[in-house]
Image (cartoon, grey):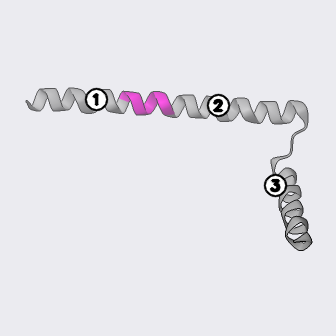
């Protein structure tokens, strides 16, 4: 029983490590895309906030 539990825990740990690597790769890819297209996430967030404020003022 304990060997089965140990095996399951090891498999879960391997899965978590794989997911972590995939997430890190995804983040690196997104950052690369941002640099390639000149995307500025913070600037877009600020623009969205400004737009929301203007829409609320219009109501």
What secondary structure is marked by label 2? helix
**Residue at image coords 31%, 26%:** 11
Identify the residue under disc 1: 10
Q: Earlier in the sequence, mark 3 or mark 1?
A: 1
Span shown in magenta: 14-19
Identify the residue under disc 2: 26
Q: Quadrant of residue 31?
A: top right
Q: x, y percentage for residue 48?
A: 84, 56
Q: Nearer the viewer, mark 1 or mark 2?
A: 2
Identify the residue under disc 3: 45
| Label 2 CA crowd tier, 10 Å (few <14, some 14–19, many 20+) | few
What secondary structure is marked by label 1? helix
Give the alpha-carbon distance from disc 1 to disc 2, as whole Å: 24 Å
**Residue at image coords 84%, 63%:** 52
Tell which residue pokes out farthest to the front in this image.
59
Report the side of 8 relative to 22 (left or right): left
């Amino acid at each position: 029983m304990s060997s089965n539990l140990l095996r399951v825990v090891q498999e879960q740990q391997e899965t978590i490590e794989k997911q972590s690597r995939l997430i890190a790769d995804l983040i690196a890819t997104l950052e690369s895309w941002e640099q390639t297209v000149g995307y500025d996430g913070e600037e877009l967030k600020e623009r969205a906030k400004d737009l929301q404020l203007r829409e609320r003022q219009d109501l």
